[in-house]
Image (cartoon, helix red, strand yellow):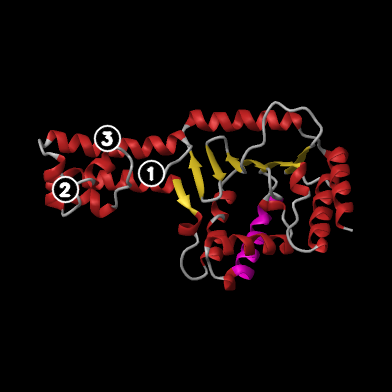
Amino acid sequence: MASSQYPAVQAARQALADRLREIRLNAGIKSSHLAEAAGWDRWKVSKIEHGQRPPTVADVRAWCRVCDAEDQSDDLVAALQAADSAYATWKRLQRGKDGLRRLQESRLPLYEGTSTDWTYCSQVVPGLLQTRDYVTELLTLVSRRSGGPDDDIPGAAAARIDRQRVLWHPSRKFLFLMEEAALYYRLGSPQVMRDQLAHLADITASAIPSVALGVLPFARPRSQWVLENFTVFDSSKVEVEILSALVTITAPGEVSLYLAAFEDLYHSAVFGAEAGKLIETAATSYQ
């Protein structure tokens, strides 16, 4: 089973493995007999039960058939799919023709259905605050990393920009925090970066009722180390972006950890004119 540093994800996967083992033991079937009856190599059952190999839907159904537990197969398949959806690789999310565009489009309902959004970014500008050229440069890199086609990048960029309309809804609140370092990580030409930073400066200077943007300075003391990019939706769901996957967290205890980390980061950030000065200073490096 693909390893995960996120306890809720790993726990869901191990719980499924434990249920499969329990079914085999209750049926009084040895692992070697199960493997032979299902047409597998002799080590597959042990690897599945110890969480070392992810079962497929076909594996689960074969397991239940051999163990005379087919009445449990639908529930187990649902558990498998739930565990898989909590850890979705970017390659899987973007597969198929125009996959990158469809992924961007699919994100809109989540943002439209969220009343409060807390986003922290350590390496890039938050997606809802990106300019079109910056988005295009970023998604080009994403496409290359995932092995996807480049021909859907204009559509994907348009879909991400279209998502930004949620910022203007008066009943929603968005709090963005970003590391000062992200202002200096160059994507595209100097002009792309100048335009992006000018856009951020406008946001810090303007009064968009739903939006607050904070920057975490290099030199300011802090009580939380730099983390991976993450967003908390309505205090009930967290999405964490790692290199290989989008991890979805809904376990209350883990959501609370991210909310606490966000609060620590918030207290180390500067807003308004102070944030604007950091952004303007960064912009001078692209002259």
Q: Earlier in the sequence, mark 3 or mark 1?
A: 3
Give 44 or 132, whichever is nearer the viewer: 44
Q: Which residues are magenta?
A: 153-168
Q: Which residue is mark 1?
A: 83
Q: Considering only order in the chain, which callout, 1 or 2, is on the residue closer to the N terminus?
A: 2
**Which residue is identified by label 2?**
35
Report x, y in % for residue 221. 77, 27
Q: Residue 277 is drawn in which quadrant?
A: top right
Q: Is residue 42 above or below residue 261?
A: below
**At label 2, which amino acid type do we have?**
Ala
Residue 284 image position (x, y, % from top left): 89, 52
Q: Is residue 38 above or below residue 176?
A: below
Q: Which mark is residue 259?
A: none
Which residue is rendered at x = 12% and y = 47% of the image?
A: 66
- Is residue 201 or residue 28 the one in the foreground? 28
Q: CA distance from mark 2 to mark 1?
A: 23 Å
Q: Residues within 10 Å of mark 1 (few under 14, many from 20)?
A: many
Question: Could you tell me if the residues under marks 2 and 1 are in contact, i.e. CB atoms within 8 Å?
Answer: no
User: Are the residues flagged by discs 3 and 1 in contact, CB closer than 8 Å?
Assistant: no
Mark sitting earlier along the chain (2/3): 3
Disc 1 residue type? Ala
Q: Nearer the viewer, residue 259 or 144?
A: 144
Q: Which residue is mark 3?
A: 18
